[in-house]
Amino acid sequence: MATKTITITLDAYKRLRAKKASNESFSDIILKLTRRKNTLDYIRSLKPSNELADNIEKAMRETRKAKLRKVDL
């Protein structure tokens, strides 16, 4: 496996170390923190919110009411 040496500030190192579990490498935590997240992953990462839940339910109701229309191409 190829490696690279990087320089980060002490503050950045402390924050990175705080995110790291004892069984994770710094590479593991950097990859985890920088991975592309889909919408569901993002929502799951949020703290529980009644307002968010209400807005999602409202959007789902509106989507169910929507009618599809035929489009001639």
Image: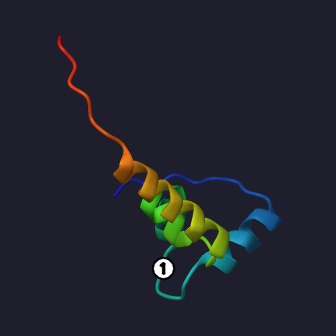
Q: Which residue is mark 1?
A: 24
- Is 72 above or below relative to 69? above
**Position above or below: 39 against 13:** above
Q: Is residue 7 above or below residue 46?
A: above
Q: How many marks?
A: 1
38 vs 9, left or right, is left
Amino acid carrying label 1: it is Glu
Quarter of the picture holding the C terminus: top left
Rendering coords of residue 49 (x, y %): 64, 75
Q: Residue at x 53, y 55 (%)?
A: 34
Q: Residues within 10 Å of mark 1 (few under 14, many from 20)?
A: few
Q: Is label 1 in a helix, a strand or a loop?
A: loop
Q: Position of residue 53 (x, y in %)?
A: 56, 70
Direction left: furthest residue: 73
Side of 65 where 19 appears, left or right:
right
Q: Is residue 58 visible?
A: yes
The extreme top residue here reads: 73
- In the rendered image, residue 65, in percent from the top left (x then y), is placed at 37, 49
Q: Residue at x 66, y 69 (%)?
A: 51
